[in-house]
Image: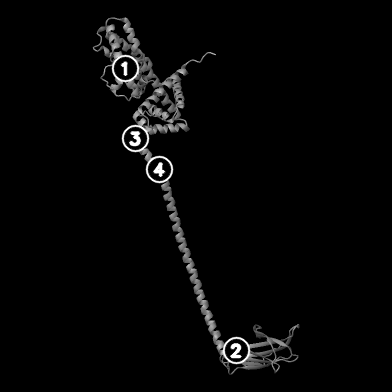
Amino acid sequence: MNTDAAPEPGEAEIAADLVRRIAAGDAAAEGELVLRYSRGLLYLLRRLGAPPELAQDLHQETLRIGLERLRRRGLDEPAGLAGFLRGTARNLIIAERRKNARRRTDADDEELAQAVHPAPSQLSAVLQDEEAETVRRLIGELPTDRDRQLLLRFYVAEEEKETICSDLGLDSLHFNRVLFRARQRFKELLERESRPAPAS
Amino acid sequence: MDHTYIEEHQVVDRYLMGRLSPEEAGGFEEHYLSCQECLDRLEVTESLERGFKRAAGQDAARLAATRQLAVVVWLTRLSRSRQAAALLVALFVVLAVPGVLSYRELASTRAALERERIAASSRTTAEAERLRAELDASHRDLASEREAHSRAAEQLAQALRPQANVPILFLNAERGGASGGEPTFRLHLPAEAGWAVFALAIDPPHHPGYRAVLRDARGREVWSGADLRLNEQESLSLSLPSTLLVPGDYTLAVEGLAPGRRPVPAGRFTFRVLPAA
């Protein structure tokens, strides 16, 4: 993968269009921007360790900062809108961590870690148990022990694809196919579980 | 970054595992900020990974099948070289344990054989000693037999030689029951071992046969003989080796024998043996 390459043409064109329109005062474009990047920013902030409430705050702040910048002076590279938003979100969470660290005179590592990575709530624990049960069901449906070995070694042991393929005598295509099908089936099972039971 | 690349390189999974390079991670993050498809894939994969790890963690606390999973996880976490080392250790244990047991059994067998050898050696020594003792006893017995044979042969030879100066004692039966006095008849033993002849006069009624018993002064039987017959002088003649007699008083009791009848006393003769003159 060439990391220096430009984003997908579709994304680049869309981003550039949004930057131009927002700079032109197009309010709809601002709405489109929020709709387009909101979910991604939330996810990114959670991946960076922000708890759900903080992630919401920071995602809002990111969008605000982004829109203000676009309204005032736009971007030097309009196609790099996603990169700009990503950078803004990361800077905000880093600043938040520093702010939390400065607030405590005697650094309580556990409290700080809890603020950034809070322990799962009871509801989360129930949801995670549900995920575990769905995984067991998924493993039970697998046709071969080799596929089970593949998933266990990849997701639990986090082993490299090349090593797994070499040990199990698989090619890359088979490996990708097993992962893809496992993901699809897992999604189906999860959605089936979350679907409300039909009224009797 | 397009979806073909993302799928082929398991970018989603590796991103969640934190195994993308900073450049790759940045590029993917910029991509999924606006990609609903990848965000869906991220959320599902995150849930899937969480489910796997949680299931593995839960199952690890159970007994049976979970142990296999933990072993697989542990093994797969090892580097290839460590996996090979773990396999070698397992193979060594599998091969070495029987070898060690065999060696210990062999050593035990050797020790048992050595003990048996020592015991056998002891038994052999004891047996040899016993046989040696028996041989010595046999030698002594043989020597005694030879000595006795030699004496007997000498006596026989002497007996076969013509005898001269043979003491002869003519005896008459005592009259009137057991005598309390000294014997009337006396016999000097010969200077050298030889014979002593006794001639016993037997009064009638005579019998077809007789038997005689010689006793010393203490009543011990010194000699007895049967199938004795009278000669032409109506007396019994006895030749006894002189070595049978030692100086002292003796009594010869004679009984007449007849078929179908009880023995009948035929006379009692006393004499004194004196040392050689």
- Which of the two discs, 3 and 2, labels the residue nearer the N terminus? 3
Q: Quadrant of residue B269?
A: bottom right
Crowd band around label 3 with a 10 angstrom C-alpha radius: few (<14), some (14–19), many (20+): few
Of residues A142 and B124, the one drawn nearer to the viewer in this rendering: A142
Q: Position of residue B247 (x, y in %)?
A: 61, 88
Q: Give SS at disc 1.
A: helix
**On the picture, is A186 further left or further right than B172?**
left
The reply to whether discs 2 and 4 touch (Cβ–Cβ < 8 Å) is no
Count residues near mark 2 (Cα–Cα under 10 Å), then give few for <14, some for 14-19, many for 20+.
many
Task: Say whether residue A102 is visible.
Answer: no
Identify the residue at horizontal 49%, vertical 67% (top origin).
B127
Q: The disc labelled 4 sits on which kind of residue? A: Val
Q: The residue marked by circle 2 belongs to what chain?
A: B
Q: What residue appears at the point 53 percent right and 77 percent down from the top-left corner? A: B141
Q: Which residue is mark 3?
A: B80
Q: Residue at x 41, y 33 (%)?
A: B71
Give the number of the mark in front: 3 or 4.
3
Reading the chain from its start, which is encountered first: label 3 or label 4?
Answer: 3
CA separation in Å, label 2 and label 1: 150 Å
Q: Which mark is residue B242?
A: 2
Q: Which residue is mark 1?
A: B31
Question: Which amino acid, mark 2?
Answer: Ser
State the separation of the CA atoms marked 3 and 4: 20 Å
Q: Which of the two discs, 3 and 2, sits closer to the camera?
A: 3
Q: State yes or no: discs 2 and 1 in contact (Cβ < 8 Å).
A: no
Q: Which one is in front in this view, the residue at disc 1 or the one at disc 4?
A: 1
Residue A110, relative to residue B141: is it above or below?
above
Query: What is the three-letter code of the residue carrying label 3?
Result: Arg
How dense is the environment of label 1, judged by Cα within 10 Å: few (below 14), some, or many (20 and up)? many
Disc 2, SS: helix
